[in-house]
Every structure is written in C-alpha cells, then in structure tokens.
Amino acid sequence: MTKRRRIWTIVGGIAAVVLITTVIVATYIANNFEPVIRTRIIQELERRFDSQVQLEKLNISAIPRLHVVGKGLALKMNRYPDLPPILIADEFSFRVEWQDLTTPRRHISLVHLKGLEINMPPRGQPSGPPGSAPPPSSSPAAEEPSKPEDGPPAVIVDQIVADKTMLRLWPRETAKPPKEFELIGLRILGAGPGRPLSYSTKMTNYKPPGLIDSMGQFGPWHKDHPSETPISGNYTFTKADLGVFKGIAGTLNSAGKFNGILGRIEVDGETQTPDFQIRMAQHKVPLTTKFHAIVDGTDGDTYLEPVEAKILNTTMIVRGKVEGVKGEKGKNIVLDVVMPSGRLEDLMQLAVKGRPAMRGAVTLKTKLDIPRGNVDVIEKLGLDGNFVINSARFVNQDIQGKIDGFSRRASGRPGDSEIENVRSTITGTFLLKDTLLHMPKMKFAIQGAEVEARGEYGLRSEKMDFDGVLRMDAKASQAFQGMKPILLKPFDPLVSRKDHGTVLSIKIEGTREHPKFGLDIKRTLKKKDK
C-alpha cells in the first residue's frame, strides 16, 4: 500500500468515526432534547395565550438540523372554560438551525400546521349577564384595558402556513351555534409576541356563499380580551350567490378595506350586483352600493353607517343594523331608508311584475324590517313610511287618456284638447306587513281634481281595495258637453260643497293592470265627506 493510499485510508476512517459519532451524539441530543423542547413549547404557548396547553406527541430528529413534529396540539384559554380550545392542530412541524439554539431569541423560519381549527371567543365573558358587553358602536367596557404582550420575544417565527383552517366565531350565548368559515391557504408572516403579523388567506363565506380573498395585519394578540386584538386589511368578495336568501337572486361582487379591533371592525367598501332580482317581480336590475359599516367580528352583528345604494338611476341612503337575537338562530335587519330623489319606474321595475305602470319622480322615507326566518323575503318584509310622487304619468296610453279626459271634465273644460299628458301628484303613508300594503292616507291630485283615499293593496295578488273622496273644481253639470249639463244641473246642489264644485264618494277596486272606479251614491248623497 502506498503512502498516499494509507493517508486516505486513515482520513476515511477518521471521517467515518466522526460521522458515526455525530449521528450518535445528534440522536442522543434529540432524544434528550425532546422533554426540554416540549416544555419550552408548552411554556411559550401558555404565556402568550393564557391557556392550558395539551400536546399529545412530539418527535425530534437532529440531522442535518433540528426537525420537530408535534401532534394533538390544543390551547384551552383560562378565561373561557366553557368554550372549545381557541386553537387545535392535528399536526405542526418546524426546523431549527443548531446555532439558533445558542441565541437568546430562538428563530424559526417556517411552521407548517395541518388540521388547524381556531375558535374565536366572544366579546366580554360568555358567562356574564345579558347585555354586559357593549355593542360595537359603543365605548369599550369599563374595566381595566388589556394590553398586548410586551418584552422581548422568546421565539421569532418568520412564516406560518396552514393549508386548510376552520375558523369559528362563538357568540356570547353558549346555546347558539358558532359561525363557521373555512380558510384556504392561510399564510402568516412575522409571528412574534408584542408585534402585529401579516396574513393572507382565502375564506369561504357561508351565507351568501362566495370566496373572500383577504390580506392585511393582525395583532398584537390581546390574551386577556381577544376581541380587542387589532386587525386591518383589504378584501375582495367574488361570485356571492344571493339566491340562498328566499325571495331574491343575483350574483354579488365586493371589494373594500377594514380597520379596527375584532370587536369593532370598520369596513369601507363597494358592491356590484348586475342581476339583482326580487323573484316575485322577475326583473333583473343592476344594484350597486357604497358603504361604511361597523362589524363585530366575534358574532357578525353589523351596523350600517351609512350605505348608499343605487338601483338603475335611483339612489337611496340606508342606515341601520343587522343583529342576532339571544338564543335564536338568524339575524334581524332593521334599517332606515331615505330616498331623496328617485324614479318611480325604477322601483316598480324592481318590485312589480310586468312593465312599470307609471313614471315619475319619487321621494320616500321608511323603516324597513326583515325579521329572521327561513321564508321568502317578500313574506316577512315590513315597511312603515311615507312617500311623495311628482309629475307622474301612466305608461298605458288608454289609462293616461282617461286621466286626461277626467282632468278636462274636473276643470269644467270637457272639450279642451290642450289639457293632455296631465301630470299626477301622489302622496301617502304606508304600512307593509305579510305582503299586504296598508295605506291609511293617500292623496292623488291632477289638474282640476284630487282624490283622498285609504285602503289596501296585495303585493302578490295585485288586488286593490280603496275607498275615498273625489273633489272636482267643476260642478257636475260643467263636466260634460251636449245635453248632459242640462240633465245634471238639478243634481249640482246634491253633490256640491262649500269649497268645491263637486264632491263624490268613490271606490277603487280591481287589479293594478285593470283598476275599477265606482261611485258610492249612498255616501255621496249623505254628504259625509267634507
């Protein structure tokens, strides 16, 4: 054997001994580090989240770097003993460079989580008395404010990745089920105590179903009051199917930004629904909104302050709330709606079958109430308000022709062809309940005449039943030509009043498409209508 060969044989033997020794030492260290690392993981999580930590299994390998795999991780928050663990992971894994173990701050580049579940507790204490937690729009509870964890971080994590995550928002009433969202591709950057982390994820929204793509910042974590944890970011919400709500349909897209804390998130955004439809009317119309809302991220209650909605060429301002009820499933919607200047034909196209019967300018104020319940929206929709319609004309030329002719007679100019395309003014108050529109007071005015009426209109049946009073400027004998004025002259005193030439009691029946006008002779002759 040559001298060079003997040297390489010796070097190879030394390398083999070193390698075997390294493996033995690394295996020994890994086996003996397992209880140390396990203890440190548990201590760190307990400190950060004020929780009891359960870790079923921990495996460590040491070559070429420290590789940690844990299974059965659960964090049970001490403040919420009646709720499921705030965090559950079927498995987590990460790698640590050996030199990082010698530094005061441990550094982990990547943590991978599998089977992750997050159970977000509600505002305040779930076991407290009803009403103990303020709504999102009020000031925080009068208690010692929580503070994010301070001091130098013991562990710095560059990135946390979870393929699929189930997020549950638990209500204050423990009898109610939580709201569930599936997060897809959750990625968290810069995870460390005392500082916010950046995140990105896609989330499936359960109602209406659609995909929310969100990215922003979260934290630092408030372990005493999780609902006070800061959150901010941007979102897009695409292809949300409104058809899951009975009575309406359409595909909604939205984008916006949000900022605040989990218990009070301020959201500014826009929505576009090009095919919005009330199923009963069967018309698709474009609906867009711009909104500022306050959302309680712990229970989903929403406060609209305000929403500017536009249907075709009609704009309305909406303020109100979407709130849950203690111990009951679903949410109630209570809104104040103001329409400063709208088009009557837009509203009729949205809400009524067939072609819009009238055109005109409309102003409206109403309280809108949609209680919880799995029924058609139109069945549970409630309205209570008033309206004014100006410069109204009937689209149907036969009906408009009759209005023109009536206006000529009511003015005492039955043969005046210059009175045409007469505009109407309609005002009234209304109350909608159980698809029946009650109108305790309505006034219909045209040139030469006005009608005051009260009655009901069925949204589904389209049937109307009104009674009222017709007042005309002209006397009965002045409303006609030919021999009729002579024949009607004796009746003028019977149907005249002090301030009007003619006052008649009338009834309006039939349907929207085929109204029927009739004279109540008995009431007219009794002169009970002033």
Image (cartoon, rainbow, N blue to C red):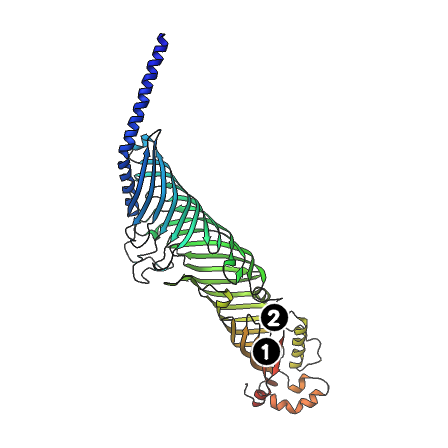
User: What residue is shown at x 65% (from left), y 76% (from top)?
Assistant: 403
- Is residue 496 left or right of 224 when viewed as pictured? right
- Return the residue at label 2: 391
How crowded pointer 1 is (Cα within 10 Å; few <14, some 14-19, many 20+) is rated as some
In the rendered structure, which amino acid carries the disc numbered 2? Ser
| Label 2 to label 1: alpha-carbon separation | 24 Å
Q: Nearer the viewer, residue 530 or 68?
A: 68
Q: Quadrant of the C terminus?
A: bottom right
Instruction: Check the image and name the residue furthest to the top.
Output: 2
Whether residue 128 is visible to the viewer of this picture, yes or no, is yes
User: What residue is shown at x 28% (from left), y 29% (from top)?
Assistant: 28
Q: Kindly identify which numbered label has been placed on residue 509.
A: 1
How crowded pointer 2 is (Cα within 10 Å; few <14, some 14-19, many 20+) is rated as some
Picture quadrant where residue 110 is located: top left
Task: Compare marks 2 and 1 and give the one earlier in the sequence.
Answer: 2
Residue 48 lies, in percent from the top left, at 30, 45
User: What residue is shown at x 30% (from left), y 29% (from top)?
Assistant: 27
Q: Nearer the viewer, residue 516 or 348?
A: 516
Whether residue 472 is visible to the viewer of this picture, yes or no, is no
Work out whether 517 lies above or below 333.
below
Q: Quadrant of the N terminus?
A: top left
Q: Nearer the viewer, residue 50 or 368?
A: 50
- Is residue 108 left or right of 245 when viewed as pictured? left
Picture quadrant where residue 9 is located: top left
Which SS class for mark 2? strand
In the rendered structure, which amino acid carries the disc numbered 1? Glu
Which SS class for mark 1? strand
Instruction: Check the image and name the residue furthest to the bottom.
Output: 490
Residue 223 lies, in percent from the top left, at 31, 49
Residue 211 lies, in percent from the top left, at 48, 50
Question: Pointer 2 and pointer 1: residues touching (CB < 8 Å)?
Answer: no
Q: Nearer the viewer, residue 284 or 175?
A: 175
